[in-house]
Image (cartoon, rainbow, N blue to C red):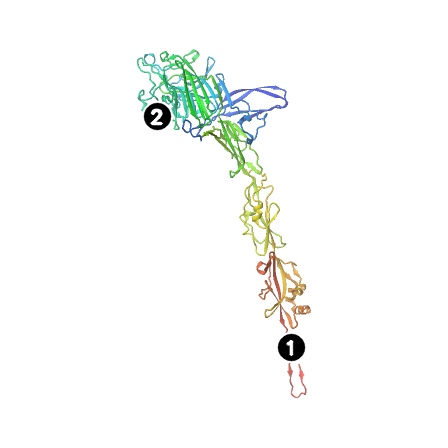
Amino acid sequence: MKRGTLKRAGADYKKRFVLRKVKKRWVVTGLIFATIVPGLSFAEKNVAADDSLVTSNFPILYDNALTTPQTGKPALGIVPFAAVTTPTIDNVTDTIQVGEIHSATYDNSNYQSAFTVSSTGTADLAHNQTINGTNYTILTPTQNDINKKTGAVAFNQQIDMTKDWTFNFTLDLVRLNSGGLASGYGVGDFIGLVLSPTAPTQLATAGGTKQFGGGLGLNGLPNSLNWGIDFYNNSSSQDSNSGNYTPVGFGDSSLGVNPGALYKMGNQVMGWRSTGANGLLNTANSTTDQQQAISTLNGVTTSSGKDANKWGGSGGAPDLTAPVEVNYVYNDDNTGTITVKVTTSSLQIFTRTINLTNTSMSVGVMAGYNLAYTQMGTHITNFTLELGTGTTIVNYLDQNDKQLRPATKFVANTTDTIGITGGSANAGTDTYAFTAPSFQGYSLVPSGTTDITVGSDTINNGTTVPGNTLNIQHQGDYQSAPLTAVSKTPGVPVPISIDGADMTNSGATNQPITFKTTDKDLPAPGYTYTVTGPDNQSYDTLANALAANPNYNDDANGYGVTKDATAQPFVVSYTADNVAINYGIVTTAGNVDTTHASELKSSDSLTPSQPTIGQAVTSSLVTDVTTTPDAETPKLQASSVIPDGYHLTGKVYWSKDGSATTTPLPTGALSANDVSSESKGKDKATLLFEIAKDYAKTPITLTQTGLTGEREL
C-alpha cells in the first residue's frame, strides 16, 4: 500500500477525492481546500489489483469444496492514519479502526469504477461503455469480432454472505431466439447472475475454453452458481454434437427447444445452474433448478426478434432490456436465500436457499457464446452490500514458534493483503501494513512474516472458524552466558580445563542455558569448588547455579548482533586443600615417633607458611638436617626430640599418612597423591627425620712384654 501523507502546520486541509485507474492500480486523487485549524494529517493509499487464484481451506459450498480468490481491494476513500493514531496490530480488532469500510452502495453512475470486467476470446472483448448517458458493460461485443467469447462484470471484492444484500441489473439483448423464415440467427448462449468463490477478476477466464457457449460461462469454475437464460439446448435430443461436450450435452434439460427451419421459432430456458468441485456443470434438474421454458422476456416475444447480431437501439443501445432484481437474505442458521425477480410475460420469482460453508463470494453478471452469437450486456442500477470480511488470527512467535503472548484477532475485508512493517517482504504494497508490538529481548525478523491475503471464514457445524492466520516471527536476541574457571588459591593454577564451547557459550533470549560441562566434569582431587551464577550468588554445584539461573536474559541487543550488553557469567571457583604438615622421627628400623611433633614444628619454618595442594613446599629444618645433621642433633637432643645415644642421619622422609611407609620428599607442587585427606578441604602429611644409634665406645687392652703395668688405650 502506498501511503502519501498530507501535513500542514496550523491549517486544516479538506480534500475531495477522485477515483482514477492507472494501469492496474486504483488511485485516490483530489483537490485541496484549506481552512485554518492546527495540524491535521491524512494518509491516502494506492492499492494494486491481484489477479491470482488460490485454493482455499473452505470445505464445501452446495456440498462441494471451495476455491477462494485473491483480488485487489478498491480504494473507497482516504485512510486517516495520521489523524487517528495507527494501533499496533495487537490492538486492532477491525480494520475499521484504520479507515476501512465494510459496506457500500453503488448505482449506474458509479458502478463501473467498483466493478471489474474480465473476458476470454480473440478480440473485441468485454468492456464498459456509456450510451445515451447510461453506463453499460458489453459482455459479448460483436461490433468487430464474432468469434466465441465469454465476458463477466463483477464487484471487485467478494461480498459478505452472512449479511443481506441487493443487486439490480438488466439483461441487455438484441432479441430472444428466433428461427425459421423470421431470422437466420440464434442468440447464443447465456446471460445471467453469477456467484462464485473464483476471484472477481477471473470469472470469465479461470475456466478457459470450457466456459464458451453451452458451458454458460460457468463451466470450469468450481463450486459456482448462476441464474439466467440458456439460449441453446446442447442435449442429445437437440444437438447432434452433444457427445463432444464435457459434460455430455453440458447436462442441459429437455425443456429447451432450439430454433429451426421454416417457422420453428424455438425457446430458451430460464433458471439455476451450478458446478461441482471439479468445475463441471451439474446436470440440470428442471424442478430443483426451477427451470422454465420461456419465449417472452419483459413482454417481448421470440417472434418480435430482428436478424441483427448487435444492438440497434438509439445511439447503439440494446433492443431488448429486462430488469432483474436480486435479493439475498442471510437466515442466521448458516444458510442464505437468494430471490430473483424478472418479468417474462408476467413477473417470475426464483428462489434458492444455499448452505453456507464460507462467508464470502464473488457476485456479478456473466454472458458468453460459441457459434450462435449476439451482443449481450448489462447495466447495473443498484448494488447495496456488506463487503466480504474474514477473521485473522495473529500469532506472535519466537524462533521456536513459541507464543510470546496470547494470540489476537481482527476483521478485515476479504482480498485485503496484510503485512508487518519491517517484517513482511511485501509490506510496502500490502493493503495494510501494521506495526508489530515489541517484546523485550526479541527482534522482528526481516521478511520473516509472510504477507497474507484475507479469505473468508468457514462455518463448521454452526460455528464460524477464522479463515486466516498471520504468524509474526521474532528472533530472540543474542545472549552470552560463558562458563569459566578460576583458582582462588594464590599461585595455584586451575586444576581442570573447561570445554572451549562453554567458555564462549551463547543462546537466545529466554531460552534454556545449557553447557557441555556438568558437575561430573568439575571435581578435581585436592580441591573444592563452588559456582558463582549470574546473580552473584554462590552455589555448591553447577546444577544448582543453573537451576537458579535457568534461562538467558532479555537484553535488547538487536537482530543479527553477536555482542551482549550484559553477559551472564558462570564462574567455577577452585580452592586448593590446605595441607597440615606433621612432624616425627623414624629410626632406621622403621619405628615412628611423633610425640615431639610440636618441638620439631617450632624448630621449622615452612614456605609457604600454610601449604596447599598445587604448591611446592620448602622447610628450613629439612634443609638444615640434610646439610648439617651433626650440628642439628645436639639442638634436637636438647629439646628431647632425639634421645641420648641417637643422632640425625641427614635423611628426611615424607609420609602421607604418618606411618613408616615413606617416600622421598616431593620436589614439586603437592598433589592429592602426596597427602591423605583429613576432611573436606583439609589434607595432611608428615615429615619424618631419620635417627640412628650412636657408634659404641669398646675398651681396648694392650700388653707389652717387659713392661710392668698395663695401659689402656
Q: Residue at x 58, y 54 (%)?
A: 495
Element at badge 2? loop
Q: Position of residue 515 (x, y in %)?
A: 54, 47
Q: Earlier in the sequence, mark 2 or mark 1?
A: 2
Residue 638 drawn at (x, y percent) = 69, 69
Task: Place residue 277 in its image quadrant.
Answer: top left
Residue 247 image label: 2
Q: Can residue 425 be seen?
A: no
Q: Is residue 687 above or below residue 257?
A: below
Residue 564 can be seen, yes or no:
yes
Q: Label 1: which residue? A: 697
Q: Is 149 drawn above or below residue 556 in the view shown?
A: above
Of 527 and 374, the residue lying toward us: 527
Q: Position of residue 74 (x, y in %)?
A: 50, 23
Task: Please name the amino acid that badge 1 sits on.
Answer: Lys
Q: Is residue 48 left or right of residue 146?
A: right
Q: Is residue 113 above or below residue 625?
A: above
Q: How many neighbours does mark 1 have within 10 angstroms: few (below 14), some (14-19), or many (20 or more)?
A: few
Dot 2 amino acid type: Pro
Left or right? Give the position of 529 relative to 711. left
